[in-house]
Image (cartoon, rainbow, N blue to C red):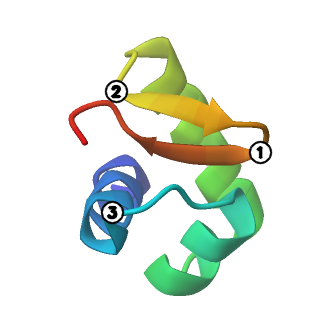
Amino acid sequence: MSVEKVLETMKAAGKPLKAGEIADAAGLGKKEVDKAMKVLKEQEAIVSPKRCYWQPKSI
């Protein structure tokens, strides 16, 4: 599922990423990444250290 792939991509990057950067790195469409990030936000698995950038909560 794309949710896990998005989270793994974010963890592998080791730095906050924009949704478009996550889509490119994961090889997914931007809409798919947006949907996955919505789920991750609801689960509180990701946080935004600055506007438009996201990272896993565990970093």
- Neighbor class of circle 2 (other Cα within 10 Å; few <14, some 14-19, many 20+) is some
**Which residue is pictured at 21% across the width and 34% down the height?**
58
Question: Could you tell whether 45 is left or right of 18 in the image?
Answer: left
- Mark 2 = which residue? 45
- Mark 1 = which residue? 52
Q: Is residue 26 above or below residue 36?
A: below
CA separation in Å, label 2 and label 3: 13 Å
Spot occupied by residue 24 in the image (x, y as percentages of width and height): 61, 84
**Which residue is pictured at 57% across the width and 76% down the height?**
28
**Which of 14 and 3 lies nearest the eye of the viewer?**
14
Q: Is there any visible trace of residue 36 in the rendered image?
A: yes
**Which residue is pictured at 49% across the width and 14% down the height?**
42
Residue 19: name its quadrant: bottom right
Q: Nearer the viewer, mark 1 or mark 3?
A: 1
- Neighbor class of circle 3 (other Cα within 10 Å; few <14, some 14-19, many 20+) is some
Please, what is the three-letter code of the amino acid marked with disc 3? Lys
- Mark 3 = which residue? 5
> In terms of sequence position, does the residue under pointer 2 or pointer 1 come before the other?
2
Please, what is the three-letter code of the amino acid marked with disc 1? Cys
Q: Is there any visible trace of residue 27 in the rendered image?
A: no
Spot occupied by residue 59 in the image (x, y as percentages of width and height): 25, 42
Question: Could you tell whether 1 is left or right of 26 in the image?
Answer: left
Spot occupied by residue 44 in the image (x, y as percentages of width and height): 40, 16
**Which residue is pictured at 78% across the width and 37% down the height?**
51
> In terms of sequence position, does the residue under pointer 1 or pointer 3 come before the other?
3
Please, what is the three-letter code of the amino acid marked with disc 2? Ala
Mark seen at residue 41:
none
Question: Which quadrant of the rendered structure holds the N terminus?
Answer: bottom left
CA separation in Å, label 2 and label 1: 16 Å
Q: Secondary structure at mark 1?
A: loop
Spot occupied by residue 50 in the image (x, y as percentages of width and height): 69, 37
